[in-house]
């Protein structure tokens, strides 16, 4: 089998139905073919990185209780007992939420005897919350 260039591989995998659909919308088949090629290339790049990690992070902070925990930890490390007291939630619920945040990479845990202390994993977590607030202001 002869070597194929990257453009040839992309060209072979272009869905003709997608081209026809886009051509009907924009009224130009050549432009639709070019745009479809570009979209295919973009989707391949997205799929290489895989959106799963980002989805896990956004799901973790999408819950109001977990977002409150992140905002509490913005001020520094707290013991689980302090977090459950602040949230007025049972230990099992608080630990469940902290586990989700930890698995998403948003918080770090430190054990000291029988006590567990949590802090934000990185300053980027605080920045993410700040950016979300800023995005909401832009309407």
Image (cartoon, helix red, strand yellow):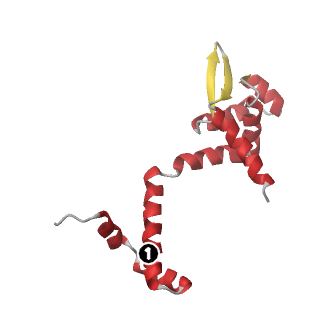
Along the viewing direction, whichever of 99 and 90 lies nearer the viewer = 99
For the C terminus, the image quarter is bottom right
The residue pinned by badge 1 equals 34
Residue 82 place in picture, x, y as percent: 78, 24
The residue lying at 62 percent from left, 30 percent from top is: 121
In the image: residue 24, left or right of residue 13: right
Q: Residue furthest left?
A: 1
Along the viewing direction, whichever of 40 and 61 lies nearer the viewer = 40
Residue 40 place in picture, x, y as percent: 44, 67
In the image: residue 101, left or right of residue 84: left
The residue lying at 34 percent from left, 72 percent from top is: 11
Q: Quadrant of residue 124?
A: top right
Q: Is residue 112 above or below residue 91?
A: above
In the image: residue 3, left or right of residue 30: left
Along the viewing direction, whichever of 88 and 15 lies nearer the viewer = 15
Q: Is residue 51 above or below residue 102?
A: below
The residue lying at 81 percent from left, 33 percent from top is: 87
Q: Quadrant of residue 12?
A: bottom left
Residue 26 place in picture, x, y as percent: 54, 83
Residue 133 place in picture, x, y as percent: 77, 47
Q: Is residue 117 above or below residue 100?
A: above
Helix, strand or loop for disc 1: helix
In the image: residue 105, left or right of residue 134: left
Q: How many marks?
A: 1
Q: Residue furthest top?
A: 113
The residue lying at 47 percent from left, 68 percent from top is: 39
Label 1, residues with CA under 10 Å away: few <14, some 14-19, many ≥20: few
For the N terminus, the image quarter is bottom left
């Amino acid at each position: 089998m002869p070597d194929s260039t990257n453009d040839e591989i992309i060209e072979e995998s272009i869905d003709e139905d997608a081209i026809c659909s886009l051509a009907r919308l924009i009224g130009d088949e050549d432009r639709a073919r070019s745009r479809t090629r570009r979209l295919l290339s973009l989707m391949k790049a997205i799929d290489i990185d895989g959106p799963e990690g980002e989805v896990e992070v956004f799901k973790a902070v999408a819950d109001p209780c977990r977002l409150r925990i992140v905002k509490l930890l913005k001020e520094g490390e707290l013991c689980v007992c302090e977090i459950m007291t602040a949230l007025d939630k049972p230990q099992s619920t608080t630990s469940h939420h902290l586990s989700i945040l930890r698995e998403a990479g948003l918080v770090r845990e430190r054990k000291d005897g029988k006590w567990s202390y949590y802090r934000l994993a990185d300053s980027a977590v605080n920045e993410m919350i700040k950016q979300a607030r800023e995005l909401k202001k832009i309407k």
